[in-house]
Amino acid sequence: MNDLSADIGYKSINHAGEQLCGDHVDIVEQDDNSMVIVLADGMGSGVKASILSTLTAKIISTMVAAGMSLDECVETIAKTLPIDQSHGVAYATFTVMRIVANETIELIQYDNPDVLFLRNGQSAEYEKTKTVIEGKTIFYSKIPLQEGDIFVAMSDGCPYANKEEAYNMNWSPKDIAEFIEIVSIAGYTAKGLASLLVDECDKLYGGEPRDDVTACIVQMRKRMPLNILFGPPANRNDSERMMRLYFSKEGRRIICGGTTSSIASRWLDKPIRSDIVINDDIGDVPPIASLEGVDLVTEGVITMSKVASYIEDYV
């Protein structure tokens, strides 16, 4: 295992006037720091498109994660999807990003806009191998991963963002890549980058998207160990052993809870200094404290409950 970690984030907005999004993103995590991400775009918009994209994403992500071949995945999709009566076909485009042990990424692309690839902050080219399965032209790529690599998968609602019916010549994939190059400098998370891109598309549509818009971004970051100590041991006689174990770990340290921080204070023989400044932005969360040798000291249950709610909003 290397020291890389995949930061994944996505955002969608619906076609104007539709209650359901015709795009769908599915993520399947595997045991060996591998995962499969599928972005599917169903034909049209609304309920039918939502059904097509959801089935496509779920079937492909599950089968690829289980080690099934691409031929089997596409054949299953062709036989499973309901037929769109107005077009006479079962149709959904898809992009698969399969991260293997945080070392390589495999791209499988069918009829969605090409995945954008940024390395060292700049747009980069990558090789594609063409194959035809069940009459569908599919492109396959395999790229070794490096820290800072960014991959941008999107539905066609992104490059077509425009107030008019015509294609927006000023918002090509090259322009989108340049947009990501600029905003990524600020150090946004993958979720933040996806949100910025989709929000920009929404502006180009004038707030009334003519298509569903989805962006899914994978950003490779260096793995940063974080050690959180929350609550004292059930047996107070274990306090010494708990402290030795906790402070033997590499990485940043956070301690949550008054009793736990007091134990750490005694073990380190350092005083706890409370921050009496109340931050109105975080409402009823108690103030933090400082303890030499620890990066952050907080209150326990209330603070962790707030953190949990933030995590739910993020994912």
Image (cartoon, rainbow, N blue to C red):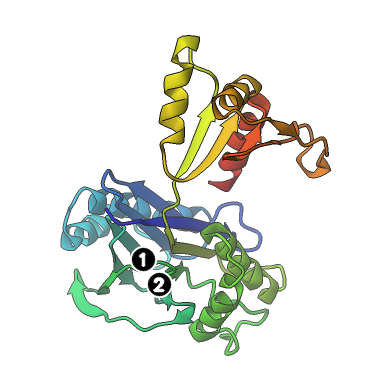
Percent position (x, y) of residue 128? 26, 79
Q: Is residue 205 above or below residue 194?
A: below
Determine the residue located farthest toward the front in the rendered image: 269
Q: Does 134 sit above or below residue 279? A: below
Which numbered circle lies on residue 112?
2
Relative depth, front residue between 276 and 165: 276
Query: Residue drawn at (41%, 60%), measured in percent from left and top?
Result: 39
Determine the image quadrant of residue 42: bottom left
Left or right of 4: which side holds 190?
A: right
Comparing 266 with 179, the one in front is: 266
Q: Where is residue 132, by image quadrant?
A: bottom left
| Depth check, front residue: 296 or 27 | 296
Disc 2 residue crowd, few under 14, some 14–19, many 20+, Cα 10 Å? some
Amino acid carrying label 2: it is Asn
Amino acid bearing label 1:
Thr
Residue at 20% in and 60% down = 75
* Label 1 secondary element: strand
Residue 77 shows in this picture: yes
**Real-space Cα distance between discs 2 and 1?**
6 Å
The residue sitting at 45% across, 31% down in the picture is 246
**Whole-percent x and y of residue 46?**
54, 57
Q: Secondary structure at mark 2?
A: loop
The reply to whether residue 160 is in sight is no
Any mark on residue 95, and which?
Answer: 1
From the viewer's perspective, tell me whether residue 310 is left or right of residue 225.
right
Residue at image coords 28%, 72%:
143
Verify CB contact (< 8 Å) between mark 2 and mark 1: yes
Q: Position of residue 117 (x, y in %)?
A: 41, 76
Which one is nearer the viewer's eye here, 150 or 175? Answer: 150
Coordinates of residue 298 in the picture (x, y in percent):
66, 33
Determine crowd level at label 1: few under 14, some 14-19, many 20+ residues with C-alpha closer than 10 A.
Answer: many
Which sits earlier in the primary sequence, circle 2 or circle 1?
A: 1
